[in-house]
Amino acid sequence: MLPPKPSTALVWRCMSSQRIHHILPTGEQYTISDGRYAAVVTQVGATLRSLTVDGRELLWTFGQDEAPSGSQGKQLIPWPNRIRDGRYTFDGVEHQLPISEVPRHNALHGLNDGFAWQLVSHTDRSVVQRHVFHPETGWPGTLTATLIHSVDEGGLRVRVHVTNDGDASLPYGYGVHPYFAFSDIDEVTLDLPFQNELRVDEDRLLPIEVSPVTAGNDFRAPRQLGQTVLDTAFTTPASEDWCVRLAGPAHAIEVWADRSLPWVQVFTSPERDALAVEPMTCGPDAFNEGPTHDGVIALAPDEEHVAMWGVRAS
């Protein structure tokens, strides 16, 4: 004799009990800490969701029960910033990506949307995650990315390692999109040691030319931001290993990168309460011919690329 079927009410109670342990919008939350520093990295997107020093949150960010907005902490793989019309030609083949920035008709900030990254290891001080970007619309190859977030007494360090695991060359670029919170960015003193900036068109923010930094955007001699509005890519750092410093009334933040990341995008939030400092391997629209094209990385099969950046505070 078959056992009696459970009642509908019993099944609903069991399902309701299971739903109490709901899945967070960004999946598992991996906490790492050492001394003064602590960070939280999410499973979805390998996003840096929190970075604190002595308990003070440094990021303009989102809660674990929320989804990120405005590319908060996003890992920009396999390209940073914009691709004009989502279209590019590589090795003589034209590719068409989906348009993700609809108002400006561009493909924006790579393909790393909604992916749950594989956890490789998680210790007190570091978390290692991996994701394979398989071929999809507009993206022709297989790219394996490994991200290592670690903290020590010197702050946060992020190592980005990618490998072309396909049988044909691939175009590649990397960037990251952390926002740093201040009560009023007008009072922030910015030290930005870059000699050139990218001039873009007003409507679509696409490249026109790389030129010497203009007087209004020149922060090589540190000064307060005041009413300066930035959504600007800078390049040609004063040294190959560079550091951008943000000094507010209560604390200072340094964003640094190695020579693999010779570009940085700086964005002042419209609310004037956060500042994005985005290390990048290349400028906007680097996949296409133009003033930033020399920054695109052509990865041959089995070829690797490694980039390093980090954050420290005082």
Image (cartoon, helix red, strand yellow):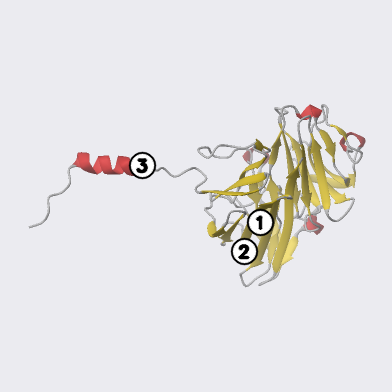
Residue 10 at x, y percent in the picture: 21, 42
| Circle 3 SS class | helix
Taking 218 as reference, is 236 above or below it? below
Provide the residue designation for mark 1: 78
Picture quarter with the C terminus: top right
Contact, CB < 8 Å: mark 1 with mark 2? yes
Provide the residue designation for mark 3: 19
How many circles with numbers are drawn on the protein? 3
Image quadrant assignment for residue 141? bottom right
Image quadrant assignment for residue 142? bottom right
Residue 291 at x, y percent in the picture: 83, 52
Residue 219 at x, y percent in the picture: 88, 38
| Circle 2 SS class | strand
Q: CA distance from mark 1 to mark 2?
A: 8 Å
Tell me which amino acid carries mark 2: Leu
Residue 154: mark: none
Which of labels 3 and 1 is toward the front?
3
Number of other residues with Cα within 10 Å of mark 1, as a class: few under 14, some 14 to 19, many 20 or more: many
Tell me which amino acid carries mark 1: Pro
Q: Residue furthest left?
A: 1
Q: Is residue 295 left or right of residue 168?
A: right
Q: CA distance from mark 3 to mark 2?
A: 35 Å
Provide the residue designation for mark 2: 143
